[in-house]
Image (tube, rainbow, N blue to C red):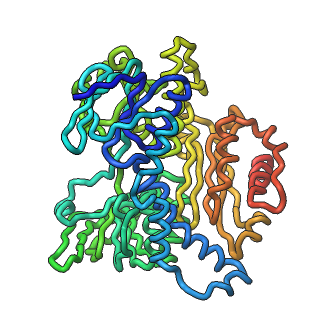
Amino acid sequence: MSEHTYDVIVLGAGPVGENVADRAVQGGLSAAIVERELVGGECSYWACMPTKALLRSAAALRAARQLPGAREAVTGEIDAAAVLARRDSFASHWKDDGQVAWLESAGIALHRGQGRIVSEKTVEVTGADGARVTLTARHAVVVATGSGALLPELPGLRDAKPWTSREAAAATAVPGRLAIIGGGVVASEMATAYAALGSTVTMLARDGVLPQAEPFAGERVTEALREAGVSVRLGAEAASVHRDETGTVRITAADGVETDVLGVRRAADGGQVEADEVLVAVGRTPNTQDIGLDAVGLKPGAWLTVDDTLRVLGPDGTPVGDGWLYAAGDVNHRVLLTHQGKYQARAVGDVIVARAKGEAVEDDRWGRHVATADERAVPQVVFTDPELASVGLTAAAAEAAGIRTRVVDYDLGAVAGSSLHADGYRGQARMVVDEDRKVIVGFTLVGPDTAELLHAATIAVVGEVPLDRLWHAVPSYPTVSEVWLRLLETYGR
């Protein structure tokens, strides 16, 4: 068994782990990453990049068809094989040579295999050939192992060999019929993608479509999915799954209760759904089952609780050991988004450097070494058709947080830039205002190509820019961003 010592050891070489190690090295420390699969992680091969590649071609085609002059140039249908080939290139054909080369150029050591914490600041790595390496950290061990798809205990589900987000992102063929259990982000995006690629898609959305978003946004996406041919069964819950000898999957759905945007409740039909593949997209589970958490008094397979500087806390609420163990990204269950995990990673890498060098730790709200934005300023884009872009709190969440709010809505399609962007543009914008501080605490856009509008709202929320100052941020004409002026005008009436 060989032994190595580094200042920082990171478990997991996804975007989060890479950023932790990079910040540590940039701060003058040595760092090593342990990875059991592909360097680059879920986002690079089975999530962010390949899924958006699956969606982009259809989005471009829809945009062209909404414009006279352009629509006449569209002479054929989408080429599913070409879309899958482009997806393959964005997933680097599931090879991590480029990512490994980047680690080397950044001065970060890589150890391949299953990493397990065996004692304080010590990690044992078991390679695919059974060889073991012991790594010791001078300052910190960081858990950045991410999360995996949750498979519920549903009769027959595992035997039916269901798709998870990984299989959906990496499929080599488009199924004729796809059933999706779930109504969240993964379910909605993959319903959008596969319907455009030619699948007959059925969604069993027990809790609705995008239930964590503003209700009007979920309703608009539901309507668009149905217009695209997706059968969306709101309130329906899968009761059992069976794949027969022909390969057909049969899902028995229990009757449920559907609640519409006005809060009206009505019966939702169950019945049976037949499909060639079934995608389960009902949540995530932490990848902490086999990383040695029991060696430091923590429960294997559990989410990790962290303090403001992302040190892992033990059952008594204090940092594990002397504070040498950190967790960033999905595993700490704060926000399960790649960009937010990378934000946490920058804070973790920098605070480890600061503590190692005896420098002051900036752990006040919005300090350099804390992830304050996780609380109330998280941006997210759902790449459905239409796109859903949001940051901060929904109206309901702001009210639940005890904030005295005013909600301002505006028809996004009524903005001059929208009418130029696409004929028949439909969308809506909402800002949620903290009436006591006169700042925006939440912002939601739903409509074609709203993703690139979001960062302005993110800056306004994070910067807590007063509305009377935002009045002087004049949007260019004629752009869709003019909705900012219209919202402020509506607020001021």
User: Residue 187: percent from the left, percent from the top?
Assistant: 41, 62
Mark count: 0
Describe residue 491's horizontal placement relative to residue 318 as left or right.
right
| Residue 208 seen in render | no
- Left or right: 166, with 274 as reference point: right
Q: Quadrant of residue 152?
A: bottom left
Q: Please, which residue is most extreme toward the top here? A: 358
Q: Residue at x 45, y 75 (%)?
A: 195
**Position of residue 199 measured from the top left corner of the image (x, y, whole percent):** 40, 77
Instruction: State the quadrant of the N terminus.
Output: top left
Extreme residue in the left direction: 245
x 59%, y 54%: residue: 389
Q: Would residue 245 appear left or right of 171 to someone viewing this image?
A: left
Q: Up-down: is 479 above or below 378?
A: below
Relative height, residue 218 to residue 310 (above, below): below
Q: Who is closer to the viewer here, 30 or 448?
A: 30
- Rendering coords of residue 487 (x, y %): 74, 52
- Residue 253 placement: quadrant: bottom left
Question: At x 21% / y 54%, what residue is drawn?
Answer: 153
* Depth check, front residue: 431 or 96: 96
**Foreground pick, 384 / 238:** 384
Residue pictured at 22% horizontal, 64% vertical: 161
Instruction: Note whether residue 107 is visible.
Output: yes
Question: Looking at the picture, does residue 330 appear above or below residue 308?
Answer: below
Give x and y (percent) for residue 72: 68, 87
